[in-house]
Amino acid sequence: MDKDKIFVSEEEEGVRLDIFVAEQFEDMSRSYIQKLIKDQAITVNGKLEKNKYLVKVGDEIEVNIPPAQELNIKPQDIPLDIVYEDDDLLVINKPKNMVVHPAPGNYENTLVNALLHHCKDQLSSINGVIRPGIVHRIDKDTTGLLVVAKNNNAHRGLAEQLKDHSITRKYHAITIKNIKENQATIDAPIGRHPVDRLKMTVIQGGRHAITHIKVLERFLDYTYVEAQLETGRTHQIRVHLSYIRHPLLGDDLYGVKSKFNLQGQVLHAKTLGFIHPATGKYMEFDAPLPSYFNKLLDVIRMKSKKQENS
């Protein structure tokens, strides 16, 4: 069983125990943290506390991560676009319409199924049976780069960088309407929507979230942008751009139905950089825009020119 000890700082005082621990382990869901608390795998100063316990300065939180169960997800021979691979990790360029890991009702044709076939038993077990090797996720309809850990040491090293917000994650996207500023920072907390539980939203008491936006190209009705994550909350870019009234093109959940025939939001994880957990060297990777994204940009450019000349 893996053990981690965390000490509460002055800035973190007053946060619920389950939220505090989830903040420290961005690769673990809050529901999983709550399960660990219920299973008595998390203690505060050697004592058991409930999810709603408010942490205090100097509290010692011990998190006992149970060993993974035997993997029972079926390996599948699904082609992978592997950008980089060594004994510790892989960098994958994920295609559109691929779910990262299995979930109830969907146990096949995910990235994890493909990884189990490619890596055999060489995947980290920290995230358990359903998410072996998965350090961070991108949405089903989002394309682009993510890193996968082959062992627990690599997983811990990458997870620590996620927690410290030191991993470089730059996304390219197309938003609705014209963003006036060349650069902007969106600093707004994100939490579960109080009514629509399928959605996240900017909400008081949500988890700290920062996104940096840079305009790459403007059109009459759309903007091509780069969005750099400082934090990594669920649906962060989608929620933040919707919050400033520039939702992603194709994002029916947080925006409006698109005039184009799209499968989900136009969002691509283009650049990924991190310190290799074994070598200590910084590595950065870049994935070209998928063909649908380039074709869409060409169509929008052409339509914008016609509108300008009419």
Image (spheres, rainbow, N blue to C red):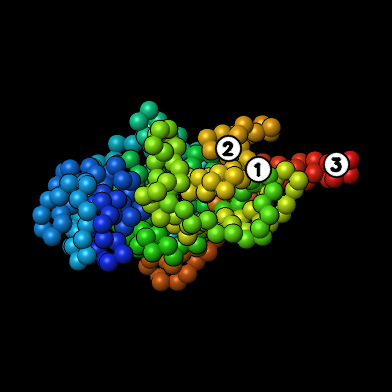
Q: Which residue is mark 2?
A: 255
Task: Confirm whether residue 80 shows in the render.
Answer: no
Q: Amino acid at mark 2?
A: Gly
Residue 176 is tagged as 1
Secondary structure of residue under mark 3: helix
Question: Which residue is found at the position 15% from the left and 50% from the top?
Answer: 49
Q: Nearer the viewer, residue 31 or 256?
A: 256
Secondary structure of residue under mark 2: loop
- The reply to whether the C-beta atoms of the residues labelled 2 and 1 are less than 8 Å apart is yes
Q: Which comes sooner in the sequence, label 2 or label 1?
A: 1
Q: Quadrant of the C terminus?
A: top right
Q: Nearer the viewer, residue 291 or 175?
A: 175
- The reply to whether the C-beta atoms of the residues labelled 1 and 3 are less than 8 Å apart is no
Please tell me how many numbered marks the rendered image carries.
3
Q: Position of residue 188 (x, y in %)?
A: 47, 53
**Which quarter of the figure has residue 143?**
top right
Q: Position of residue 298 (x, y in %)?
A: 76, 45
Residue, far top:
105
Residue, far left:
47
Q: Which residue is mark 3?
A: 306
